Image (cartoon, coloured by chain):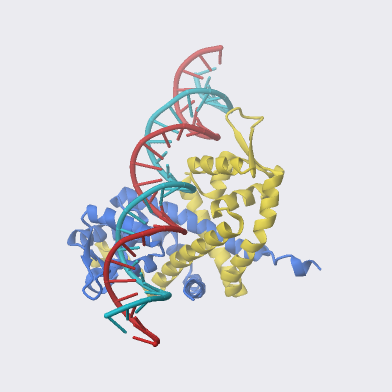
Chain colours: A blue, B yellow, C cyan, D red
Amino acid sequence: MSSLNEPRWLDPDEMAAWRGFVVASNLLNRRLERQLKEDSGLSHQQYEILVHLSAAPGDSLRMTELADRLITSKSGLTYQVTQLERAGLVARRSCPSDVRGVIAELTDQGREMLRQAAPGHVALVRELLIDVLTREQLAVLAEGLGRVSARLRLDETP
Amino acid sequence: MSSLNEPRWLDPDEMAAWRGFVVASNLLNRRLERQLKEDSGLSHQQYEILVHLSAAPGDSLRMTELADRLITSKSGLTYQVTQLERAGLVARRSCPSDVRGVIAELTDQGREMLRQAAPGHVALVRELLIDVLTREQLAVLAEGLGRVSARLRLDETP
DNA sequence: ACACCTTCGTTCGAATTTGAACAACAGGAG
DNA sequence: CTCCTGTTGTTCAAATTCGAACGAAGGTGT
C-alpha cells in the first residue's frame, strides 16, 4: 500500500528536468549578477527595475505594480528604489489619483545608464542561454514556463 | 551600419523564453521557500544541504564540494552549516586525508527531518512544475538546461 | 456621515548573502 | 628539505532580503 502514503517521487527524467532548472537558474543568476556589477555597478535587481520602468508608459510605475512585476517584496522594492534614487537613476513622484501612491520614474540619467548597461547584459543572456538552445527548445521553454508562471500567479492571488 | 555596433537584441520568441525562465524561477523559489518554512522551518537552501548530504556516500561531503553542488559561496555555506549544526541536523567532522578539510555529515536527526520535509516539498514541485508540463517538455527542459548548466560550469573554472 | 475592511508604501529588526582578507595547510618544482 | 603557488574553511563588514507591524488613505455598504 505504499502508493497510498508515499508521495510520488520524481523519476529520473523528472528529476533531471527539475535539477536542470534549479542549477541553470542559480548559475545564470550568479553569472549575470557578476557581469552587471562589474560592467555597470548595478545589481541584477536594480537593472530589472530600470528595464521595467523603461518598458512602461511614461517610464514610470507605481511601487506596488513594480513590485509585482519584479516578483519581490514591497519592502525590498522600497529599499532598492531608495538606492537608485540616491544614484540619481530613478525619482519618486506622488500619484495624482491616490494620495498614498508613489510613482517611481526613470530619470534621464537612469535611461542613459540602461542604454549603457543593456548591450552587455543582453549579449551575455544570449551567449549563456538563448544561443545554447535551439529554436524549438526556446519555444518549449516559453510555452511551458509561461504556463507554469500563470499557474503560480493564480495561486498567489485567490 | 547598425548591425556592427548594435547588439543583437532578443526577438519576441527569445524574449518570451527568457522572461518565462526568470519569472517562473522567481515565483517558484518564492513559493517553495514559503512552503518549506511553514512546513518544516527550513529554508530552501538548508533543505538542499540536507538533500545533497543524504545523496552522498556516507551522508557526508566536504565543505567545498558541498558549496559547489549548492552553487553558493563558501562563506554562505559556513553560515548555513553552522545554523544546521545548532539545530542538530548536521555535524562537522575533520577530514582524515586533509587537516584543513571539514566534512559536513548528516545526523540521524537530520535524516529524520529530511524524511519529514521531503514529501511536501516534492509534492509541491510536482504540482507547480512537473505536472504542468508534458513529458516532451520535461525532456526538452532537462536536455536544454543541462547543456546550459554545463556551459556555465566550464566558464567558471577555466 | 459613519463604521469597516482593504490597500499603499514605509519602517523596523532579524536573518541571510556576498566578496575580500586571512591563517593554516597541501602539493609540487627545484 | 625548501620555496612557491594554490586550496581550504572561517571571519569580518557591508549589502540585501524578508515579514510583520504601522499610519494613512481609499472604497463600500448602510
**Image height check: is C30 above or below A27?**
above
**Image height check: is A158 above or below A103?**
below
In this orientation, which residue lies closer to the viewer: A134 or C2? C2
Q: Is residue B95 visible?
A: yes
| Residue B52 screen position, x and y as percent | 63, 49
Q: How many marks?
A: 0
Q: Residue at x 65, y 30 (%)?
A: B97
Residue furthest to the left in view is A108
Residue furthest to the right in view is A1
Q: Is residue B118 left or right of residue A131?
A: right
Residue D14: quadrant of the picture = top left
Q: Is residue A58 left or right of residue B46?
A: left
In this orientation, which residue lies closer to the viewer: B70 or B151? B70
| Residue B22 screen position, x and y as percent | 44, 64
Q: Residue at x 70, y 51 (%)?
A: B112
| Residue B156 screen position, x and y as percent | 47, 47
Q: Residue at x 58, y 53 (%)?
A: B42
Q: Residue at x 64, y 45 (%)?
A: B89
From the image, which quarter does the N terminus of chain B lie in? bottom left
Q: Is residue B8 left or right of residue C24?
A: left
